[in-house]
Image (spheres, rainbow, N blue to C red):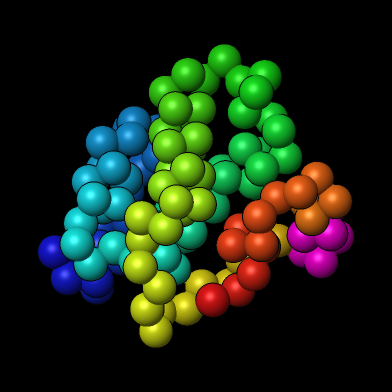
C-alpha cells in the first residue's frame, strides 16, 4: 500500500472501530517512523506517555499503544524524509522530559 493510501486510510478511520485497521497500517512496508508517530499520537499516545495507560480499563487500547511504543523505541520503523510535528506544547514536552520519556516521542521529524 502506497504512503498516500496509508494516509487516506488513517484519515478515514474511526478509532471507535477497534485497532485492526491501525495494526494493518503499521504493518505495511511503507509505514515509516513519521507515520508510526502520527498513529501513536492519534491513538492517544500522550495518555500513555503521561502514565494514564497504567490506570486505564481499556485493555485493548493499552495493549495496542504499549506495543506501538515498544516498536518505535526498538526502531521497527525506518526514518525517511517524511516529517511529523509532535502535537505537544512546550510545557507538555518539558513535563514528559522530566519523567524520562525518550526524545523520539518529543522531537519533530
Identified at 66% across, 43% down, the residue is: 49
Residue closer to the observer: 76 or 26: 76
Apparent side of residue 9 relative to residue 60 in the rendered image (left or right): left
- Quarter of the image containing the N terminus? bottom left
Apparent side of residue 16 relative to residue 43 in the rendered image (left or right): left
Identified at 77% across, 60% down, the residue is: 93
- Quarter of the image containing the C terminus? bottom right
Q: Quadrant of residue 47?
A: top right
User: Overall secondary structure of the magenta stretch?
Assistant: helix
Residue at the left extreme, as displayed: 1
Identified at 60% across, 73% down, the residue is: 108
Does any portion of residue 103 appear in the rendered image?
A: yes
Above-or-below relation of 8 to 98: below
Image position, residue 81 (x, y; %) = 39, 84
Q: How many marks?
A: 0
Residue at the bottom extreme, as displayed: 81
Image position, residue 37 (x, y; %) = 48, 59
Above-or-below relation of 25 to 59: below
Above-or-below relation of 73 to 7: above
Image position, residue 105 (x, y; %) = 61, 58
Q: Which residues, given as a range, are shown in magenta? A: 89-95
Residue closer to the observer: 28 or 99: 99
Identified at 33% across, 35% down, the residue is: 19
The answer to whether residue 91 is magenta is yes
Apparent side of residue 82 relative to residue 42 in the rendered image (left or right): left
Amino acid at each position: 500500500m502506497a504512503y498516500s493510501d496509508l494516509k487516506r486510510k488513517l484519515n478515514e478511520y474511526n478509532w471507535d472501530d477497534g485497532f485492526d485497521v491501525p495494526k494493518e497500517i503499521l504493518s505495511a512496508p511503507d509505514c515509516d517512523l513519521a507515520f508510526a508517530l502520527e498513529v501513536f499520537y492519534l491513538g492517544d499516545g500522550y495518555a500513555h506517555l503521561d502514565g494514564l495507560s497504567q490506570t486505564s480499563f481499556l485493555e485493548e487500547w493499552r495493549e495496542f499503544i504499549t506495543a506501538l511504543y515498544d516498536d518505535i523505541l526498538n526502531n521497527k520503523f525506518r526514518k525517511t524524509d517524511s516529517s511529523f510535528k509532535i502535537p505537544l506544547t512546550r510545557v507538555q514536552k518539558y513535563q514528559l522530559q522530566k519523567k524520562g520519556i525518550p526524545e523520539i516521542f518529543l522531537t519533530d521529524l
